[in-house]
Structure formats: C-alpha cells, structure tokens
Amino acid sequence: MRDWAQCYRKITVPPAQAGPWEAWLSPASSDPWWDDFLRSTPCGQFQQSSPWAAYKSSVGWHHHRVVLTNASGISGGFQILWKQSRLGRIGYVSKGPVLAQKTAEAAEAILDLIRAAHQELGLRALILQPPDESQGLEPLLTRRGYLPNRIKDVVLATLLVNLTEGMARVTSRLNATTRSTVKQAQRRGTIIRDGGAEDLDRFFAMMVTTCQRQETKPNPATGTELHDLWNALQPLGIKLMIAQCRGEDVAGQLCIPFGERVTIWKKGWSGQHRDGHPNHLLNYAGLEWACALGCKYWDFAALDEGIATAIISGKPLTEEQKRSRHMFHLGFGGEPRLVPASCIWIENPIFRFGYAAAIKALRR
C-alpha cells in the first residue's frame, strides 16, 4: 500500500462532498502514480498527464491536480491548467475529469471537487472537455449551469484506426487508392527514419509551411516551444518520424503514445516530392509502429465534425466535403468518432447571463 502523504497533500473535503475515497493535492510537476493510473483506464489521455502539464508550464500555464484514492489505489481525479489573462485567471480541464468507476455518485462528487478547486484558484472562467470515452457527464454539467463553449476552439470529432487485429488487418482496411499509393512510395525509394532533437527545427519549418497552406497558425507557435514539448514529453515516449525522398527530408509527424492509443499530434510537409507520397508512407509506418507497441488505436486527433456526423449517420458527403483535406485520413480505414463537446463555467452571474443570452441569439 502506498503512503500517499509522501507525495500528496491531504484535502479536507466538506461532508456533503465526502465519498468512499480520500482527496489529495498533487503539487509536483511530475506524478508517475497519476500517470500510471491514466494509462490503466480507457478514459485516460495524455492531456491529463503530468508531462503535459510540465510542457504547458513552459508557455505560462500552471497546474492544479487533484487525485482521489481508495483502498485499491487511485480511483480518479483531474488536472486543471490555468493562466492569467487580461480578464483574470482562466482554467482548462482537457480530457478530464477521469474516473475508474463511472457511477453517477462518483461523477457528482468529482464535479463538486472541480467546483471547489475553481473557487480556490479564483478562476473567472473554466473550460472543460470530458475524456473521449466518457459517458453521461455532459447532462450533469448542463444541470450544474455549464454553458456550451464558444470561447476556445476545441476538436469535436476524431478518426480512430483499430489496431487490435494486427497490421495485416489494418492494411486490408486501407482503401484501394491509399494501398496503391503506399506501395508506390515504397517502390520510388521514399523511406521513413526516426527523428531526434536535432531534427526539430527542420520539422517546425515543415509545420509552418503546412499551416500556411491551410491558412492556420502553428501550435506550438515557435521552434523553442516545440523543443520544450519534446523535452517534457520524453517520459511518454514521444516519437518524431521523418520521411525522406531522394535523400531530402520532406515531411514529418510527431506522435504521442499514451495508454491504449497513439495520437498524431503534429505533422508537417515541405510541399516537395509529391510523387514520392511521403505523407502516405509516414502514416503507414506510424500504424506499423503503433501495432508493434501493442496499442489499440491510432488516433488522427481531429476530423471535420460535419464529415464525421455524415459518415456515422450513413448520409452521403457533399462535394465540398469530398474535396476536404480530411479525406486523406479517411483512406486509412479509420472509424469516425464524435467526442464530448466542451463547456464553460463563468463565475460572475451577470457575465454568465450575458454569455448565455449571446449563445441563444447566435442559435436564432
């Protein structure tokens, strides 16, 4: 039995919030116990991990991590990342809270603790998005006064490739065009190599070029932040894969393995050597690597919500959707998945009322 007091500080819980567990504050940047718990449950994702908090600290965020324990070990918890803004302190619970047992009582109790932490930190607002695999939390949040988040862009759909049957089965699910293109890339001499810290600046340049084509901004925003990300996520086994065509590095992808999934977190392509199909081969090599790790899913991290909804409901895609860059990922045989929407709690009742009114007006 672990001595939780070695690393944690006991939180005094009011009788109304008490349950069959003890609550602890995890103040240290690194918390392997918490990270191991996250890996052990389908709801655990890297955005709740302590290495992710360590990375975010390099760009101005602070963490507030609460861990629940019982006789069996850690049973749940959450990690709030918060920072000072022009409007005051803003908090964000990304892919949390996480519970080992998803009962209504446990959900209510952990939301009480989030509310208490919100008040303790003096947050003006808190944005919360439940884990991808969570169920039943959204109605509870609505009942407690959380409103739909329209402040921060948050991914609402993703694409998962099932890896549980092995690489042969994964390959068989590629569509004909993708399978043929992967073979062309191999015949034309495109190769995939592991990248290291010395490749990050080149990879960041590829990211910037890709963002310019897509008319977005790179995230991380600078090469320095990318190095910070790389250093902080070493405990998670972060992997950089580089595609070479005719001896030139032309594309790359940054992958984060955590628990039962590998997530493609960032990617970049210089735009050169299109005929070498570097991006097709990168994804295929990534699938091979994830299968070898024994992971259950390859997560593309984002999919257009409209495309995901249409496929799930069996409706045909529009011509505009068929021309979308998201169609490239669909060629790898993944399953679209809608993830829980994010919501926001605004502390000031006047601001909360005005925000709710604004949302209603937008809907109309």
Image (spheres, helix red, strand yellow):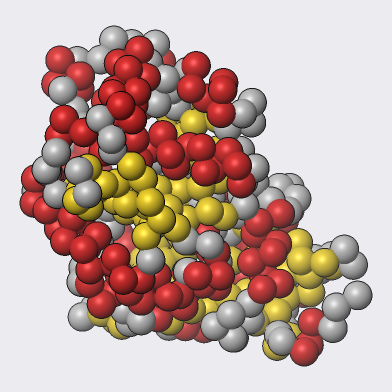
| Residue 152, percent from left and from top | 28, 57
Residue drawn at x 65%, y 42% as measured from the top left: 294
| Residue 233, percent from left and from top | 47, 69
Residue 14 found in image quarter: bottom right
233 and 158: which is toward the camera: 233
In the rendered view, would you say 122 is above or below 215?
Answer: below
Residue drawn at x 32%, y 62% as measured from the top left: 352
How many numbered tags mark residues here? 0
- On screen, residue 162 versus residue 123, left or right, reads right
- On screen, residue 298 versus residue 280, left or right, reads right
**Location of the N terminus (image quadrant):** bottom right
| Residue 131, percent from left and from top | 53, 50
**Location of the C terminus (image quadrant):** top left
Residue drawn at x 63%, y 81% as measured from the top left: 26
In the rendered view, would you say 10 is above or below 280?
Answer: below
Residue drawn at x 37%, y 19% as measured from the top left: 179
Q: Tell me, yes or no, if residue 157 can be seen here.
A: no
| Residue 211, percent from left and from top | 14, 52
